[in-house]
Image (cartoon, rainbow, N blue to C red):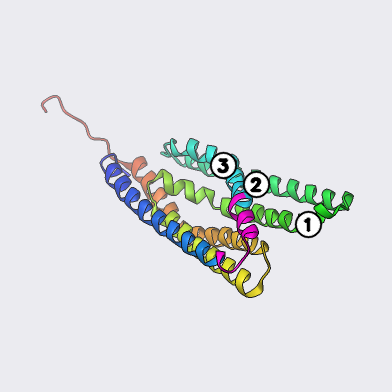
Amino acid sequence: PTVLDIPAKAYRGLRLMMLVNGVQKLVIFLLNSSLLRRTSPDIMGVANVQLELFLSTLLFFAREGVRLALLREVVDSPEKRQLFVNLSWLPAIVLFVGAIGFLAYAYCADHFSNSLEHHSSQATMFVMLLYCIGALFESCGEAWINLYQNSLHFTPKLGAETLALCVRSVVVFVSLVHFKIGVLCFGFGQLGYGLTHLLFVISHSGSIFDETETSLAGETTAPAYRVSADG
């Protein structure tokens, strides 16, 4: 975007983000209110405290630093764009290594421990593994998300988050109410969230790359105007 377009696009993006954030909070509130009447407080406590803290910690350490660094970058050449995309894959690599490490830890804990307390926490560890895989799916779309944010193109990102939230809500509700699988439903819900988020971002990836190619070509081939001595 040009310098004159930035304030207008930022204002539109801010309004859209506030609207979508309000809708998301309302959906989460309605879902939790409905689930509280159909499940035990222990399951809701594990999901809303332990699992959400685990997910927030994963995503914060894996991607937030990269996002903030790339948000300040100016992509004005094909080489910079390639470097921008390559750096955007760092969160997915970190989460992949983290998921492998967590899987190894869970295997060792299951193999060497026979305590009753350990066996009672196996379901929670499996849910955490599903959260890791869901976060990995979500982070595989970081290259496109960072390009969207860098170019102030907020609609695909917000659309992906909204659709993924709806899918997660449906999966959690159906799994908990009809299949009665307990805390596992939140793991499958997060897995559905990450996969839906990734597929939506990929389905809209052509627009951002075409727009970036056009802007880079325009900057490269822009004519240079001279100012003569006569004015």
Residue 204 visible to the viewer? no
Mark 3 sits on what residue? Answer: 60
Q: Which mark is residue 95?
A: 2
Q: Residue 184 in the image: x percent, y percent?
A: 67, 62
Please state which of residues 230 and 216 is positioned toward the viewer in this rendering.
Answer: 216
Please state which of residues 207 and 174 is positioned toward the viewer in this rendering.
Answer: 174
Tell me which label, 3 or 1, sits earlier in the chain: 3
Gap between marks 1 and 2 measured at Cα:
26 Å
Mark 3, Cα crowd under 10 Å, few <14 / some 14-19 / many 20+, is few
Label pair 1/2, CB-CB below 8 angstroms: no
Q: Amino acid at mark 3?
A: Phe
Q: Quadrant of residue 21?
A: bottom left
Mark 1 sits on what residue? Answer: 120
Q: Residue 182 in the image: x percent, y percent?
A: 67, 65
Asked if the stretch drawn in magenta spans residue 42, the answer is yes
In which quadrant of the rendered image does the C terminus lie? top left
Q: Up-down: is 122 above or below 57?
A: below
Q: Residue 159 in the image: x percent, y percent?
A: 43, 59
Q: Residue 230 in the image: x percent, y percent?
A: 10, 26
Asked if the stretch drawn in magenta spans residue 4, the answer is no
Q: Amino acid at mark 2?
A: Leu
Disc 1 is placed on an element classified as helix
Residue 161 visible to the viewer? yes
